[in-house]
Image (spheres, coloured by chain):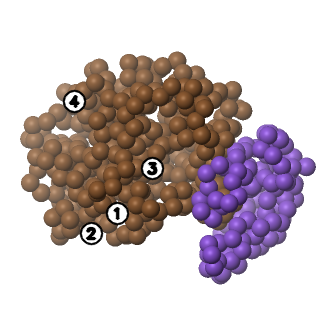
Chain colours: A brown, B purple
């Protein structure tokens, strides 16, 4: 396989973007990424999106985006893996470039969630439609089931869960693209409207519109483009049971563990080598389970680890410096690529107030459903 | 939901029919074509026990449109006496009485009415013992 680098990044602001359509969002992010890379063409493209069909009644968005980007007739297809569609689009593009078939590939993600669809229903299609959703389960509900089990098994407190939201909002305040760039307090989190006990609305990622894109290319091309070379040194993906109830341990996200193991192995790295991570904090409890299952802390200690500030920007392992899904926003298909945008900024040293000092190795983790799919990438700044 | 799709799931939703792998004995609800434990393809039809205990639970307060009139409602993962886990609503009780380890039994109930012209959907729900 060839060595590959991220050569360009671009994203829209995340939020309720009433003036922009699904295609407007994607094209804006794609143009920014192409400009940032300084390339004059792309060889192909992958568009991560969870369910544009349910959100805006539009499928076939690979071709749509290639058309509106003025890139047709390049090959284009949509990649779907629920909320990990973006990360999986990067993985698909990675293999196309690694194989030598293509040189310059655009990998992106987009979701337009605020156009009037029943969002709770649309998102729930990522769960087992016949045996979870049929009973009235929602995504906040599934993560609430994980939260309750984690609290019971490890003594994790609601205050510790709230610390995830407080920390991510603190980071998001410094991100100009964040949907909710404002500080929140622990008491505000705990006293907010309950969505699915014990999770309150301030522990749930918001409903967002947005797009993010990255351009990837072989390292030889990257070196000629004049920007710091951010290599992708590991990719890993894994699956787990679609239904949460079918897992032997409700509190362990095995797909996260397995995808991380594969990416660490390929990169020749360990959790202690990572300088910062962007992870899939769709709900407060998700970040707790993920930092445990990625190996940043022991199983069961994620709450305590977060409460002590170890995942803050100047902590032991900064997690979600972008504000994460909670503060930055979560246009589901775009999230996996927005994570790439953040770690690329960090490794280039252009993350402004959010900059993690001397960041050299970064990890992204993007997850689908209640953890039935997960994709991890590891990036390293070439020195 | 088109009626053929609804009808296909009736053995599970109405009668809790499960499948037990002839080779390794692992039990599945709903039945599968391939055992995820050992890869075997031969199963015996079994029935889930009628009782079980709560593994974890929540109360849903924001629901999709089909369930919007039911909020708040309780949902739990229940482990049946033969060790199979299912997601189910827990009804006929207040949220405060739920706890991990709580014994429940399954009842046949209405789940929801589909839109304005759709079918009435039935299935199992749990009730505390």
Residue underneath mark 3: A207
Q: Are marks 1 and 4 on the same chain?
A: yes
Write the residue at 73% across / 60% down: B28
Furthest-right residue in this view: B129
Kindly identify which chain the residue marked by label 4 belongs to: A
Residue pointed to by mark 4: A350
Q: Which mark is residue A78?
A: 1
Q: CA distance from mark 2 to mark 4?
A: 33 Å
Mark 4 neighbour class, 10 Å CA radius: few under 14, some 14 to 19, many 20 or more: few
How far is the residue under mark 4 from the one under mark 3? Answer: 28 Å
> The N terminus of chain B appears in which quarter of the rendering?
bottom right
Residue A80 visible in the shown view = no
Q: Is residue A354 visible?
A: yes
User: Which tag, 4 or 3, sits closer to the chain's start?
Assistant: 3
Q: Residues within 10 Å of mark 3 (few under 14, many from 20)?
A: many
Against A157, is A258 above or below?
below
């Amino acid at each position: 396989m060839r060595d590959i680098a991220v050569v360009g990044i671009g994203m829209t602001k995340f939020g309720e973007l009433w003036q922009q359509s699904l295609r407007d969002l994607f094209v804006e992010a794609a143009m920014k990424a192409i400009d940032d890379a300084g390339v004059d063409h792309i060889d192909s493209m992958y568009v991560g999106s969870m369910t544009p069909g349910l959100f805006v009644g539009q499928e076939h968005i690979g071709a749509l985006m290639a058309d509106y980007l003025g890139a047709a007739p390049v090959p284009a297809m949509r990649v779907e893996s629920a909320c990990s569609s973006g990360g999986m689009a990067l993985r698909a593009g990675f293999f196309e470039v690694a194989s030598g078939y293509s040189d310059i590939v655009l990998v992106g993600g987009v979701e337009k969630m605020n156009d009037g669809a029943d969002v709770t229903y649309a998102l729930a299609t990522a769960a087992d439609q016949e045996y979870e959703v049929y009973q009235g389960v929602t995504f906040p509900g599934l993560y609430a089931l994980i939260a309750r089990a984690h609290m019971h098994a490890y003594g994790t407190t609601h205050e510790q869960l709230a610390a995830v939201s407080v920390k991510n909002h603190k980071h998001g305040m410094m991100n100009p693209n964040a949907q909710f760039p404002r500080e929140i307090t622990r008491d505000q989190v705990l006293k907010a409207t309950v969505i699915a006990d014990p999770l309150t609305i301030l522990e749930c990622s918001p409903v967002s519109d947005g797009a993010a894109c990255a351009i990837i290319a072989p390292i030889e091309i990257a070196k000629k483009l004049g920007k710091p070379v951010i290599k992708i040194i590991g990719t890993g993906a894994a699956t787990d049971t679609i239904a949460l109830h079918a897992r032997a341990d409700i509190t362990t996200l095995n797909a996260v563990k397995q995808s991380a193991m594969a990416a660490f192995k390929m990169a020749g790295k360990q959790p202690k080598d990572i300088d910062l991570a962007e992870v899939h904090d769709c709900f407060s409890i998700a970040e707790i389970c993920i930092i445990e299952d990625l190996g940043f802390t022991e199983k069961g200690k994620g709450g305590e680890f977060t409460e002590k500030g170890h995942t803050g920007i100047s902590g032991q392992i900064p997690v979600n410096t972008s504000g994460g899904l909670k503060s930055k926003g979560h246009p589901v298909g775009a999230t996996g690529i927005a994570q790439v945008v953040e770690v690329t900024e960090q490794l280039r040293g252009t993350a402004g107030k959010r900059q993690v000092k001397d960041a050299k190795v970064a990890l992204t983790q993007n997850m689908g459903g209640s953890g039935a799919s997960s994709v991890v990438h590891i990036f390293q700044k070439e020195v | 939901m088109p009626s053929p799709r609804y009808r296909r799931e009736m053995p599970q939703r109405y009668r809790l029919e499960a499948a037990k792998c002839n080779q390794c004995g692992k039990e599945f609800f709903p039945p599968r074509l391939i055992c995820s434990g050992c890869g075997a393809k031969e199963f015996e039809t079994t029935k889930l026990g009628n009782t079980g205990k709560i593994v974890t639970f929540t109360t849903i307060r924001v629901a999709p449109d089909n369930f919007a009139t039911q909020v708040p409602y309780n949902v739990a993962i229940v482990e049946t006496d033969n060790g199979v886990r299912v997601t189910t609503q827990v009804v006929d009780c207040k949220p405060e009485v739920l706890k991990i380890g709580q014994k429940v039994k399954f009842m046949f109930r209405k789940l929801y009415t589909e839109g304005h012209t759709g079918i009435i959907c039935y299935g199992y729900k749990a009730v505390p013992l």
